[in-house]
Image (cartoon, grey):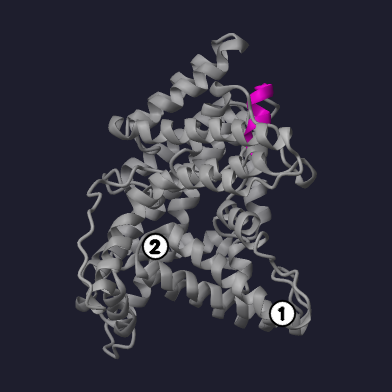
């Protein structure tokens, strides 16, 4: 069930009606059952994967918390490793095993040791990376010693099921931690003033971003070029890269907008996942603005446990090692291919460079810059680093990435052959991204302060625009594949 379809526009009001009409004692059941039904619409066959990860992480959290409380001085690393390993197994099997097996066979052949490993030739369960990382975070937080912030396991299986499977964020985030949602599922807060207006604003904005920006540049610029880059000139390839960077941002942030807006209609708040990422002036700053919940996840569960930046004297190399490994994990989280390995390493080098410059200048990633020129050249370098690295994100493999990259140097001059609509959307999309954030906040406050008639009129205008200018195809959100 895609957010931007009629199915969802029927499903959501029915869920809201059932939730707010149900007695308070039954509202958690409404949330849990509707979330399971939502995932089942994708594939009933993969529902056991989601429910299995839910059951294993809940039971594993109970078991580890009990062991910790029975023997507080025990480190219990083997037990934690077993639970976390079992939770990672479905992700490893469905997403990474084919790639690992292919590389093992290639290495064996190179060494004269032929291998033939079995494959799991099945589609990837939608959202598996998101709900697996959410389950891992819950278990890690629950198993920690009490003096290091360890929390009690949630004793209610229905509440935990709802926490892990809640449909607004289930298949493409944001990646939630227990502090983000579990306390709200305990209290089941009522609607606060302005939440309906804010929620409808975010949903309408998300629908417009997806259908009127992301899908139009995808169909009009991105897909034709990446399907056969050899047919296009260097300038056309560069425009397609700008278009893809815009597409993936508007596509992913649109999902987040709809997820956060939907949550608000249930009286709940979810964490933001984006903060104008293409305004960053260094690569480290970009990762503070892009997919924030994933960046925070790897920071807290990978970077900090490895030591982070807390090293002494001559061991500064360990900081750069930690940065590289952290960004490598971010890269591979997105997909099982050498493209994503190289993507993660490139961004690791970018963040390491930012770290080195910060040590020299004492300036933090988001500190204000002294002059407009200082901002302009730093922004231009960061933005184009991100845009060029997107080749690895979108191309099928490393040879395809290299073909795309070398094609940028084609000296043939030809006006890019794209439709006027695609050009207009590209320009307007970037212009909106670079407007002051206070403008967007003022527009949201204005909309929030109006009444149901204005809300309904705005939603109808967005729907009419989507029907008129949209491509008519129901294109899935890009991050569903992760």
Q: Position of residue 357 (x, y in %)?
A: 69, 82
Question: Is the residue marked by circle 1 packed among few (<14), some (14-19), or many (20+) residues within 10 Å?
Answer: few
Q: Is residue 37 left or right of residue 368?
A: left
State yes or no: residue 271 in magenta: no
In the displayed structure, would residue 273 be above or below residue 111?
Answer: above
Dot 2 or dot 1, earlier in sequence: 1
Kindly identify the residue that appears in the image at 60 percent across and 53 percent down.
Answer: 297
Which of the two marks, 2 or 1, is nearer to us in this view?
1
Extreme residue toward the top, this view: 23
Q: Residue 142 sits in which quadrant?
A: top right
In the rendered structure, are the residues bearing label 2 and label 1 in contact, judged by CB atoms less than 8 Å apart?
no
Q: Position of residue 144 (x, y in %)?
A: 69, 44
Of residues 60 and 122, the one nearer the viewer is 60
Of residues 364 and 151, the one nearer the viewer is 151
| Element marked by disc 2 | helix
Q: Is residue 179 left or right of residue 121?
A: right
Residue identified by numbered label 1: 315
Question: Is the residue marked by circle 2 packed among few (<14), some (14-19), or many (20+) residues within 10 Å?
Answer: few
Residue identified by numbered label 2: 424
Q: Residue 365 sits in which quadrant?
A: bottom right
Q: Which residues are magenta?
A: 180-190
């Amino acid at each position: 069930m895609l957010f931007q379809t009629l199915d969802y526009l029927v499903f959501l009001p029915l869920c809201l009606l059932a939730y707010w009409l149900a007695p308070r004692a039954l509202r958690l059941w409404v949330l849990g059952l509707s979330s399971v039904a939502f995932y089942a619409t994708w594939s009933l066959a993969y529902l056991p994967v989601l429910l299995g990860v839910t059951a294993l992480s809940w039971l594993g959290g109970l078991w580890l918390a009990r062991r910790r409380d029975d023997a507080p001085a025990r480190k219990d690393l083997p037990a934690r490793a077993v639970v976390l390993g079992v939770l990672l197994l479905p992700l490893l099997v469905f997403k990474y095993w084919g790639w690992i097996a292919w590389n093992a066979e290639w290495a064996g052949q190179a060494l004269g040791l032929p291998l033939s490993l079995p494959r799991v030739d099945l589609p990837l369960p939608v959202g598996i990376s998101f709900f697996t990382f959410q389950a891992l975070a819950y278990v890690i937080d629950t198993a920690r010693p009490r003096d290091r912030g360890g929390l009690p396991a949630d004793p209610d299986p229905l509440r935990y099921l709802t926490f892990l499977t809640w449909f607004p964020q289930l298949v493409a985030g944001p990646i939630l931690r227990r502090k983000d949602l579990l306390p709200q599922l305990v209290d089941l807060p009522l609607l606060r003033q302005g939440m309906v207006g804010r929620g409808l604003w975010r949903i309408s904005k998300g629908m417009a971003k997806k259908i009127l920006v992301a899908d139009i540049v995808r169909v009009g610029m991105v897909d034709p070029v990446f399907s056969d880059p050899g047919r296009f000139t260097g300038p056309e390839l560069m425009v397609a890269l700008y278009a893809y960077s815009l597409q993936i941002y508007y596509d992913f942030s649109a999902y987040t907008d709809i997820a956060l807006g939907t949550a608000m209609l249930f009286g709940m708040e979810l964490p933001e996942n984006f903060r104008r990422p293409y305004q960053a002036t260094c690569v480290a700053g970009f990762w503070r603005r892009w997919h924030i919940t994933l960046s925070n996840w790897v920071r807290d569960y990978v970077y900090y446990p490895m030591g982070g930046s807390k090293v002494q004297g001559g061991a500064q190399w360990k900081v750069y090692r930690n940065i590289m490994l952290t960004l490598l994990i971010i890269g591979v989280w997105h997909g099982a291919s050498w493209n994503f390995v190289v993507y993660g390493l490139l961004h690791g080098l970018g963040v390491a460079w930012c770290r080195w410059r910060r040590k020299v200048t004492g300036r933090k990633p988001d500190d204000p810059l002294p002059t407009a020129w200082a901002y302009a050249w730093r922004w231009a370098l960061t933005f184009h680093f991100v845009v060029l690295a997107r080749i690895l994100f979108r191309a099928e493999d490393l040879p395809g990435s290299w073909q795309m990259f070398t094609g940028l140097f084609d000296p043939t001059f030809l006006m890019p052959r794209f439709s006027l609509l695609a050009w207009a959307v590209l320009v307007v999309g970037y212009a909106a991204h670079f407007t002051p954030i206070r403008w967007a906040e003022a527009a949201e406050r204005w909309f929030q302060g109006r009444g149901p008639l204005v809300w309904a009129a705005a939603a109808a205008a967005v729907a009419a625009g989507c029907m008129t200018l949209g491509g008519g195809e129901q294109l899935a959100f890009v991050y569903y594949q992760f």
